[in-house]
Image (cartoon, rainbow, N blue to C red):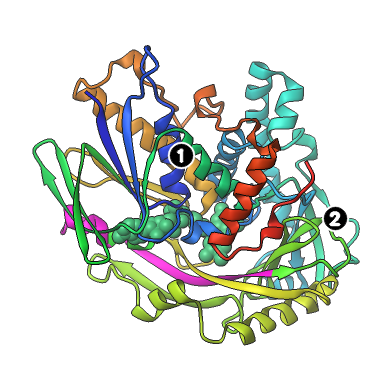
Amino acid sequence: MIETIVIIGAGYTGTLSAALLSNLKRKNDQRIYRIVLLDERNSILDGASKVIDRLHLGGEYPLDQASALSCLQGALYFKQMLPDVYSKAEATNYILAEETEKEGTLTFERMIQNYTTIQQSYSAYFDIFSNLHGKERAIHLLFGHPNTLFSEITDLSYVKGFKKGLVTKEKGINPVILGAFLESYLHENSVEILTNHRVIDAKKTECGFDITTQTGNTTKVLKANQVINASWQNAFSVNQYISPHTNHDELNVFLRCSAVVDITDCPNVNTSYFGMLGKHGGSYSPMNDKIAFIYFPDTSGSYLGECVQNAGNPLFPSLWVDYIKNGIIDKEERGKFILSSLTKCYPFLEKAKILNLFVRPVLSSRKELEKRRYETVKQIDSDGKWISALSMKAVFAPTNALDIVRIIQQNSMNDNFISKNECLIVDTKCDIVLPKEFILSNTRFYHKAFKAYARQYALARQLPIEMVEDEK
Ligand SMILES: Cc1cc2nc3c(=O)[nH]c(=O)nc-3n(C[C@H](O)[C@H](O)[C@H](O)COP(=O)(O)OP(=O)(O)OC[C@H]3O[C@@H](n4cnc5c(N)ncnc54)[C@H](O)[C@@H]3O)c2cc1C
């Protein structure tokens, strides 16, 4: 018998879980699971995951080493799973604002200390990987040789108001290439994708769950043996269908927006910048020499507000729901403000033009922006077959997806649906090298048809098609 796994929410947490599960096969090459991926939106990967632009290595968490190292681990999985989806930027510069240093929130020594710890861990992972696959492959597939993971910036002439900084091997992500690849991968691997399906209820049954979805005025009940709830900002409320009283967690929710800009007329700065810290920060992520994502953390800029979510208050403010769905009213003015503020620190943006602004939520188990605590995967019902997953950053989604696969297989084994030798388990506490079944890359990136597909993907999400390059 084949088990049905229903996944609620098609962001990176849901889609990566679907991709990994769809690769699990029996000895006779038959798939182990039927996978149904639900999303309330018209397109998959159109929630928070639509606007990510960086594969953090841990530099973003200079005050929180646990999150920094979790980040590194997630990035190593991400890079192995998806080796070909990165922006053209050669490096990511982490720069320390003069004001931040003056206030004493962060020192340059602390930044170096953080990156040195990251480097030590990376070095250990690098050795494990090299021993298995050779040094050259490790350099190419991971983040280069450990000695080159970071260095002090020698040229700060491109930026203003920053004193010092680090050049790091952190990668930029091109969300259009990544998303288009994943979407086509899921289609190819027979994952059933149901968009415009909003989950409005769920019940536990004798052999699993009944999930009720709504599309317009039509409701439908889907049967599932196991469920992954990856519905991000709605995760608390969706969990409550199954377990109304057990969720005592609290989450801080931040509403942010990312501005997409045309940089065709700007000087070619083939580097991402990440300004530290908080209100003195701001980031610049070029996808190629045409398009960049920018962010300015000010309440008149990219930072739109915050609230607390818990069992008593699991829903989003209705105004926020509207912002996320339809954008914000002062989009044009705000976009201009973000660009002009950022141009003061990054003068090379002077000729950039705002193309669009996307509003999405970020969740965190801590209030402090600098201490964004990492991933969580929880088994919610008494049998452990309703699994809830939150990836506080997209970089944590692969670690969560691997944990989800482990739990699902363990459940299937307990119920005698699969045998031990059919399990493909990665222990995220100690394994760092992924088995080939979890490496999702193939040669399609180099095909013209994929570029056309990726442009359609961008159009469906109002992202600029220029994010897809013609050469290659
Ligand atoms: C502006 C911005 C920039 C960011 N940049 C980065 C970055 O550079 N790097 C990084 O690592 N992280 C970044 N993040 C964080 C990252 O976007 C999130 O951590 C990540 O995308 C969460 O993925 P997810 O799959 O859990 O959620 P989502 O991508 O939001 O997916 C959840 C899905 O669930 C669906 N859904 C919700 N409720 C229901 C329901 N009831 N029924 C059916 N479907 C439902 C939604 O439509 C959505 O598609 C950024 C976030 C923001 C806001």
Q: Is residue 28 visible?
A: yes
The answer to whether residue 192 is left or right of residue 158 is left
Q: Which mark is residue 187?
A: 1
Give the residue drawn at x 35%, y 13%: 421
* Disc 2 crowd, CA 10 A, few/some/many (<14, 14-19, 20+): some
443 relative position to 438: left or right: right
Q: Could you say which is closer to the camera, residue 29 or residue 372?
A: 29
218 to 211, vertically: above or below: below
Q: From what the image shows, is residue 149 above or below residue 152?
A: above
Name the quadrant containing residue 383.
Answer: top left
> Which quarter of the image is occupied by the N terminus?
top left
Categorize mark 1 by other alpha carbons within 10 Å: few (<14), some (14-19), many (20+).
few
Q: Is residue 64 left or right of residue 57?
A: left
Q: Is residue 255 magenta?
A: yes
Residue 201 position in % (x across, y down): 19, 58
If you read the primary sequence from the N terminus, does the residue marked by circle 1 or circle 2 appear first?
A: 2
Q: Inspect the image, locate mark 1, and give the three-letter code of the amino acid beneath it.
A: His
Mark 1 lies on a secondary structure that is helix
Res 63 seen here: no
Q: CA distance from mark 1 to mark 2?
A: 44 Å
Residue 159's tag is: none
Q: For the residue marked with disc 2, what is the amino acid?
A: Ile
> Can you give x and y, in whole percent of width and height, for residue 241 in the image?
18, 57
Q: Can you identify the residue that label 2 sits on?
A: 153
Mark 1 vs mark 2: give the one in front.
Answer: 1
> How far from the left and from the top, in percent, is residue 84?
67, 39
Q: Quadrant of residue 441?
A: top right
Q: Position of residue 100 (x, y in %)?
A: 70, 72
Which region of the structure is painted magenta? 237-260
